[in-house]
Each structure stands twice: as structure tokens, then as C-alpha cells.
Amino acid sequence: MDPTKELELKLKELKIQLELERQKHESARPIREKIAQMSSEVVDSNPYSRLMALKRMGIVDNYEKIRDFTVAIVGVGGVGSVTAEMLTRCGIGKLILFDYDTVELANMNRLFFQPHHKGLSKVEAAAKTLSSINPDVTLETNNYNITTLDNFHDFMSRISHGSLTSGPVDLVLSCVDNFEARMAINSACNELNLSWFESGVSENAVSGHIQFIVPGETACFACAPPLIVASSIDERTLKKDGVCAASLPTTMGIVAGFLVQNALKYLLEFGQVSYYLGYSALTDFFPTMRLRPNASCDDSFCQQRQAEARARPPKEQESVGDSKMEDKEVTHEDNEWGICLVDETDPRKLHADEDLGRGLVAGVKAAYTIPAPVVPDAESNEVDASGVSLDDLMAQMKAI
Amino acid sequence: MDPTKELELKLKELKIQLELERQKHESARPIREKIAQMSSEVVDSNPYSRLMALKRMGIVDNYEKIRDFTVAIVGVGGVGSVTAEMLTRCGIGKLILFDYDTVELANMNRLFFQPHHKGLSKVEAAAKTLSSINPDVTLETNNYNITTLDNFHDFMSRISHGSLTSGPVDLVLSCVDNFEARMAINSACNELNLSWFESGVSENAVSGHIQFIVPGETACFACAPPLIVASSIDERTLKKDGVCAASLPTTMGIVAGFLVQNALKYLLEFGQVSYYLGYSALTDFFPTMRLRPNASCDDSFCQQRQAEARARPPKEQESVGDSKMEDKEVTHEDNEWGICLVDETDPRKLHADEDLGRGLVAGVKAAYTIPAPVVPDAESNEVDASGVSLDDLMAQMKAI
């Protein structure tokens, strides 16, 4: 055959192959265009019809307002990634993601990440998937550890100026797995006077909690911190030594569900926002409570917010956060922070231990020397779940 | 330029482009190989390390046994798809999926399906994604409506012979959205003596429930069916008329989490399986209860299973299902099935209505003429949540 003819044929064949490959690849790309305005129209092609139906059902007055909100999610792991996906599918205006980890196959026992994400940074992999799920959501990614000095400065800047209108975010959701990061978020939110939700899952995978923190109005994370945290060894080192915490897609999905559901109630003003909601999977037990701020909290900005709250007229004070929120308070019994880390599978094993820091299991230490009474200013009333505050502390400790 | 030379250059360029396209496409494929045996080894490449850690944590004795189990999931929508994903990530042996719907953009407000699945059958899209998440799970798909005569026969055959050892499945999970499908699953499970979980989410998107049904031991779906169901119009027709139920990824994710968590507790024998667990999102309320079977149930196989249960020695009877399950019973007060469909946002609005079928909202009708007392044989004891049975019925009704 004429060599030119042969080349032309090869060229034609290659062009077809190329087109086929492109089509294959194309089919893996998002196929929906941006939507300018949320519509209630009930057609198969409207991704918002079932959300806008919340208005007709009398649940939410103004669902489309969700597009105005910016939420920061710190930690895009087992809870944070599902949290981001739920908010994305709900059509949130903007998400700001913070994480510094990469996706590994060891993460595949939780929802969201897939094997083909392996090796990507968690924020990059998340943003890629989320924007394909809902291109209407503005996504900002920050691939760093918020606890270092420089990064903390940038973190403060992003949550105070990162909203769609360059103002503060509407809510911060903590989905981190360690004490330092929680304390960093707490400091930032106290200083910036931002409401936030803390979340956590126990290391035995069968319990978790969410906690709503309104600076000055409720206990902050420093008002009632865990008493026991992992020693200076970080999670990576622990992992290398062959020690790793258990986790389940169920517990993490449920905690993410509680977190986003309460975030939606807060942002869109429906129902009652829970100040604290626990989940114990073994018995399907769900403790709720409210912790008042600690008058002698170590965080000076918390003290400042408390003073501001006291200075507000009672009515206004009551309405901070959400006027519809239940005002539950917790009975503290007589276990004044004297607790020790025991097997959570048997709640009866819980007992007081005055000498905290002695006899702890390897790999944990007391988080700080215990100051004078740090018991939150709680008044006992309606809550009948005795020992609920212990569950809270246990959950916080286990989440470290 | 020499035309042959030119062609050769073009050819070379095309070959490079083709290679690039192939690489792009390749990167979208699952990258993990099958794993012959579950390992506890804590390395980034082990997708089972965090699950096998449940053994070291003292939660589950024999986690790797999960590979022996086959679970049937009927309905692969907002709850069923997340249920399938959770079980897949947990490393279940085999899943048998049943659904006859296709993926639409209107499904994008719930987890799991993505815009690029649009137009695929739900079972096909699910199997594709699930096998890429965990190639160790055996997936069987059945793209049909189980309620037609022929399909029901095949459904019975698959759940009685579809396990990894060609025997009955270990558990059936109902994630359907209509009365007929629930009744079909109920009939099949009563006849085959298979334990199953029913699940449902209300049409206002803010409540849901799961219910564990052990033929002969607990009330079956026909023992205590909803009193009000959608009129003969099916969901598609309703949709075309511009009416659609609200849904949220949060509520559906939480219900799927409860469903799979209790399925895991049942299969792997840890914790206490809940017979009924409700979820009311507006107030974070979680009612639990147990309904005893109805001695005059319309389903003859239910009656047969009840007789078998009565004939068993008490000890054996107690151990059916899970010996560790709580034996809670519900108080029924004096509202003998006389209830009507009211706004769930205010539980105080619930009131008795003896004349069921009159004054119902458009689009619903009484499910059947009310027979003589169908109140389950409940004995009142420890459960203090008065009105819990009403919540149950409301949730079932709303889920239609």
C-alpha cells in the first residue's frame, strides 16, 4: 500500500480512538450546568425540587436563602466529608474546607472518598467530587494544619472574611479528630464571636456527639475541655506503631447527619437547635443537655463574651443563637471533674477518680493541671438523664 | 513540508493525545485489587484496618465474619443507596439490590447518586459505584418492581436462594417508599420466616424510623399497618401533577445509619438491636418501643409463625433474633387506631378521630376498612414515652 495512504488510514483510526476515549472521559464529567435560581418546579431535571418542597410542607419559610450562607468545615475526614456532601446537596452558598491530610485506602471504611482519590489531598479530592455533585456551590480549599502559628492566622482571616460577601462565615463546623485543633477553633470563634458546632466520634466507633457553642451564651470548649488527651505523639506516629482507632461509616454518617441537620435548623430558623446531642450506638441512647459557660474559663475572649452576654437585656440574651432552642440544663451530681477513662461499653464502670493523671493508660496524659473549680455554671432542672455530663466528657475524651 | 512527514507528525501528536486521554480515563477507574482475607494490619493501604480495630476495642468478637453474610436491599433510593454504600464499605459478603427506577437530577438532594449517573437504572448505577468502592463485595442487581406477580415470585426465589451459599439471605432491609412494596416484603418474609428491617422517612423530610420485624416474635407490617395510604395514583403520576414530597440528605443519611448500625448489631451480635427507633429532626427526639404480634393478623403466615413461637420453650423464644435485644413494650393508651393525619410539627395537634377516611387531605385514602380490634397484643410496662405508638403510626403513614 502507498505509505501516505497507510498513514492516512492510521490517522483516521487514531482520530476515532481519540474521540471514543474523549467521550468515555466526558461521560465521567458532571453533566449538569449551573442553575441561576432555585426553583420549586417538580420535574426530574430539577435538583432542588425536593428541598424547595420543604416550604410547601410548612417546615422552612425561605429555603432559597441557603444560597446566601457560607459554612467553614474544619477537618474533611469521616465526619467532615459527609458534612460537606450533605451541605453541597442542600445547595449551600459557599463551603470553606480546611484539612492537611491525604486520602488513603485506610479511609475507605467511611463514606465519601473512593479508591480513585488515593494520594490526593482530602480538600482537593472533596472539592473535585463536590463541584461535580453541585456546581452551584462555591468551594474554597485550604490544604494546611490550622494549629501552626502562620496557618492559624490565615484560618482566622478566612473565617472572618471568607463569606460570599467577604464578611465572616455564618457557621463553623468542627470535624477534627484532636484536642489541639478543637482548641484552635475554640480560640478563633471566641475572639471573632462566631457560633460553631463541635463534633466527635469515640475511638471505639460506637458513640459520638455534636455540641453547639455560642460564645458567652454556652460553655466553650475551654470552659469544659476533656481532661485527658493523647500525649504529644501525633496520630501518624500512633498509626505507624500499629495502633489505630476503630471507625464505622454508620456512626460517622449519623454524627454528620446530626451536625448538618442542626446547622440547617440554625441557619434556616426551623425546629429547635440541640446544644448537645449524644449518640450511643450499642443501646440507641441519645442524651441531650446544655452547658452554661464557666465563669473562670481560661480563655479571655470567652470571659469577654460572657460579660457582653450578661450586659444584654435578658430578652436579647435569650434570642442569641436561636430563639427556638430548648433551654435544657444538666445536673452535675457530685462528680466534680473527677473521672477516669474507662471502657465505654459498660456505663456502670464509670466512677470518680480524684487523682487525675495517675494510672492512665499508655499514650494519654492529663490535658492540663486542673485549675480551681471549672465546673460550668449549671443549674439543675428538667433533664432527667443522670450522668449525662459524664457521657459528654467521655465522648470528648474518646474523640481525641 | 513533505505531506508524509506532515502526516507522521500529526500521527505522533494524535498518539500522545490518545495516551493522555487514556490515562485520564484510567485514573477514574478503581485502583484497588480484591483482598483475599481481612487483615488487622495498620497500614495506609489496608481498607479494613479501622473495622478490624473493633475487635481490639472489645466491640465485636469476630468482625471478619461479615464476609459470610448476604443482605437484600429493596429500594435503592435516598435511604437504600446509602444503606448499600455503608454495608459495602463495611465489607459485607454479598448485596442483592432490588429497584426499578432510574437516576434523575431530582435525586441529587440525597446522598450517593451523582449527576453523571443520570438516566442509568438505580441498581446499575449503584452496583457500578459500589464495586469500585469495594471490589470484595459480591453484587447482584434486580431491575424490577417486586410487587408484580412474576417479579414477586422471582423476589421470593432470590431472597430464599440468593446467599453466598445459595441459601436464604441473612437479612432483608426495606428501603422502599410505598405501602404495596412494604406489604410484599412483609408477605415474603413471613412465608420464608426471614427477619427484616422496615425503614421510612416522612414526606415532610423531618422524621423517620426503622423497625425490626422477626416473624412470630414481633408485630409484622400487616399486624400494625398504616391506616392511610396514597390513593391508587402512583408516585410518578403525582410527580407529573407537580406534587412531590420533600426530602433531605440529613434525615435519609441518619435513617440509613440507624438501619445499618442495627443490622450490624444483629449480624455481628454486639450491643442491643432496637425493635423500633424513631427520629424526629425538629426536636431531636428518638422514640423506641416494641410491638407484639397481632393475634388476629390478616397474614396467615404471620399467624403460623406466632403459633410456632408460642410452641417454643420460653428460653428459645426469647433468643430469637438477638438474645441481647431489649424487651420494651409500648403503652397504647386509649386511642384504638382512631387517629388522623395532622401536621407533624406540633405533636399536640394529634387527636382521636373515630371516623377514619372522612376529612382526609386530597391524595390519600384509608388503606382498608378497619377490622375488629387490630391493636397489637401489647402489655404496658417500662416505656414512659406516652403516645409513642402514635408516632410510629404517624411515621408509617407519612412514609407512604
Image (cartoon, coloured by chain):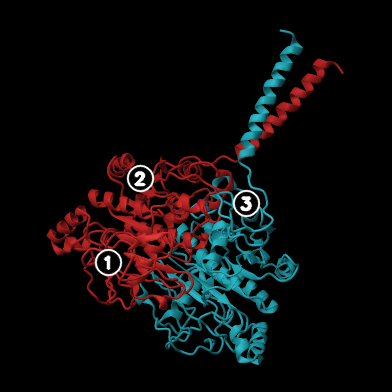
Chain colours: A cyan, B red
- Using the image, name the chain to which the residue with label 2 belongs: B
Disc 2/disc 1 C-alpha distance (Å) = 26 Å
Cα separation between marks 2 and 3 = 38 Å
Callout 2 amino acid: Ile
| Outermost residue toward the front in this view | B358
Q: How many marks?
A: 3
Number of the front mark, 3 or 1: 1
**Residue B48 in view of the camera:** no
Q: Amino acid at mark 1?
A: Leu
Please tell me the numbered disc located at residue B291.
Answer: 1
Answer yes or no: are tags 3 and 1 on the same subunit.
no
Residue nearest the observer in this picture, B337 or A269: B337
Looking at the image, which is closer to me, B337 or B9?
B337
Q: On what subunit does the disc labeled 3 rest?
A: A
- Image quadrant assignment for residue B302: bottom left
Disc 2 residue crowd, few under 14, some 14–19, many 20+, Cα 10 Å: many
> Viewed as shown, does residue B260 lie left or right of A210?
left
The kind of residue on which mark 3 rests is Ala
Say which of A54 and B1 sits in front.
A54
Q: On the rendered structure, is A2 left or right of A289?
A: right
Residue, far top: A1
Please state the horizontal and vertical placement of residue B357, each as a whole percent of the image: 34, 65
Q: Secondary structure at mark 2?
A: loop
Question: Which residue is under mark 2?
Answer: B146
Q: Nearer the viewer, mark 2 or mark 3?
A: 2
Residue A89 position, x and y percent, is: 58, 57
The structure residue drawn at horizontal position 24% and vertical position 75%, both measured from the top left corner, is: B380
Mark 2 vs mark 1: which is more N-terminal? 2
Quadrant (top left, top right, bottom left, bottom right) of the N terminus of chain A: top right
Q: Callout 1: residue from which chain? A: B
Q: Disc number at residue A125?
A: 3
